[in-house]
Image (cartoon, grey):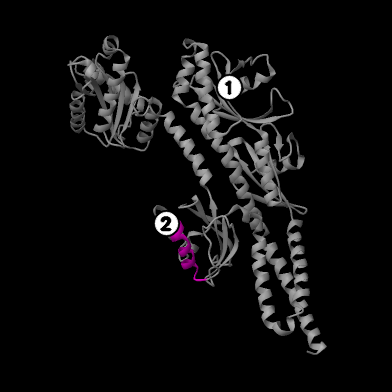
Amino acid sequence: MPKTLSLVIGVTYIISILISCLFLNKVIQSHDNEVIKLVAADIYDTIHKELVQSIMVLRTVANDNFLKQNLKDEANIPRDTEISLMANYLREINENFSYDTTFIVSEASKIYYYNKGFNRVIDPENNPYDFWYKSFVEENISYDFQIDSDEFDKNSWNVFINARIEDENKNLLGVCGIGLSIDKLQNILAEKELQHNVKIDLFNLKDNFNIDSRAAKFKDPQLRNIVYNMQKNPAIEQQFILSKVDDVSIIARSVPEINSYMVIRRNSNSVQGIFSSLILQMALSFLIALLILVFFVQRRLEKERKQIEDAAKKYGMASYADMYISMHLIDLKKNSIHTLSHNENFDLMKIEDGENVIRKIKDSFVATVDDATLKPLLDFINLKNLPERMKDQHVISQEFLSKRHGWCKANFILVDDDEDGALNQVIFAVELIQEDKQKEKLAEDFRVRSETDLMTGLKNRGGGEKAIRELMAQGQNGMFCLMDADKFKSINDNYGHGVGDKVIIAIANCLKTTFRAYDITMRLGGDEFAVYAVGIVDDEIGKNVINRLFRKIDDILIPELGDRKITISLGSALFNTEENPTFEEIYKRADLGTYASKKVQGNCHTCYSSDLQKD
């Protein structure tokens, strides 16, 4: 081929590369703001889950009736027994949630218990390491977040979360707390900084200090100014606020649970670095492609343009691709799908590029998703109503269960829309959330156990009262019953506490089989029980239910008691939203009924009436 033609082809190719590079730079710059917002959302979710889950666990501990009763009875329990009970209790929390330490300080004795047993008796008035206790108690807040140096290693910093333990009258019983090494939080920050090429700081407003991946408790004037400017407009504190100072992109958001702000900074030159890297790659590609351009000029130019367009979208989103098992770019107008990234360790969501997007995604999901979550997921991936669902939304999500990998989350992420708001391109991304689900289940199991009476399986006083108050607040009318076993003390005295326990369990079983699953049945303590029967608003209907309970009580057979029958005295009171009495008022009315029933031998039920008040 003549040299002139080769020169023309080469010059044409160089011009094409330059035009494509300019296009590429424009696309990357247009996606930069969206990229840093998505990066910030990923970092915020990671930090938020770690800290908020710890707060949730600590609140559950502070409301545990077992712990409250132990602190109330502390003076009557042998010291070694109390230390062993507290150490075992705290050790179980440590093992379940991998904390560095857990502790409880008794308000009465000022004993500092931790997961290894007895630590010391604190002195909040004179010992500087104990001043935190006095300060926290005087602030009268439910929980607090602190960062402080280790008492025994002043070069080591720890994150402490403290919570008040109070009895039913709001009297202070003590303080419980969780200790996390600052290294754990800094490792999270360091990992996210490396992953996204950003600088991350947490700024605490209370103590005016900040933490990054390398140090804690140092002050940064620029950081302080950013946070104080956000404080001037509290309405935007729950949003990601983006700004720029020189060549640095800054995005910030409040983390109210720990009274702090998360500030992320990224040098805009990193985008230019991507652009420069791509130009170098294209230049090398040109040297190789020039040898065969003579034969494939037009075809090669078209292919290069397409590769550059794909690269622009791919590199524009590279900052957060590692968050997901797989990422696919969907062009809604062309009905096509293109793979941006895929983790080869997961068979889930391995979709071939091409057209007919819905069919390709369905083919991948049907074989890998559990049947119980498949239909909601198929509804979620329906592209026909996707523009409506994503109106004013940047990301929408749907959880599902993979047969092989456990719980996952599918996300549609907005990439491009036109001036009228019509969707052009979205990213379909799948992430693994199995570990988060397991942690949520552990926390839920711990909460349920703290609200359950271990002997009977009914709710305990704390859990039952909470559930009943919630139903009343929701306007759920019903019948509240209060009851206890007749002459129960004589059973314990004459037959032993083991037989007494059998009587309590038998009565509890009668309550379970008489009342419905959504009714609230609870053991108040000893031989006292309570029930809230939802929807029963008439005394006559209530009597029928109670008579059914009495028949079951009559059938109780405990061999050790011989012919002795178990009987109960029961009082009831109706709750309706028209009168809207408080829980305390309903309890008092039912108690009057129970007192009246005690005057009658055998199973007896007394409905509340105003005449009982006169007696």
Given the image, on which type of amino acid does mark 2 rest?
Leu
The quarter of the rendered structure image containing the C terminus is: top left
Question: Which residue is at a point 54% across and 37% down the rendered structure image?
Answer: 53
Q: Is residue 33 visible?
A: yes
Q: SS for tag 1?
A: loop
Residue 343: quarter of image = bottom right
Residue 4 placement (x, y as % from top left): 82, 88
- Closer to the chain start, of discs 2 and 1, is 1
Position of 605 relative to 368 (above/below): above
Do the numbered discs 2 and 1 sit on residues whose CB atoms are within 8 Å? no
Front-most of residues 462 and 351: 351
Indicate the quadrant where residue 426 lies: bottom right
Left/right placement of residue 146 relative to residue 266 reads left
- Return the mark for residue 374: 2
Magenta region: which residues? 355-369
74 in relation to 573, above or below: above
Q: Residue 467 location, x and y as percent?
A: 38, 32
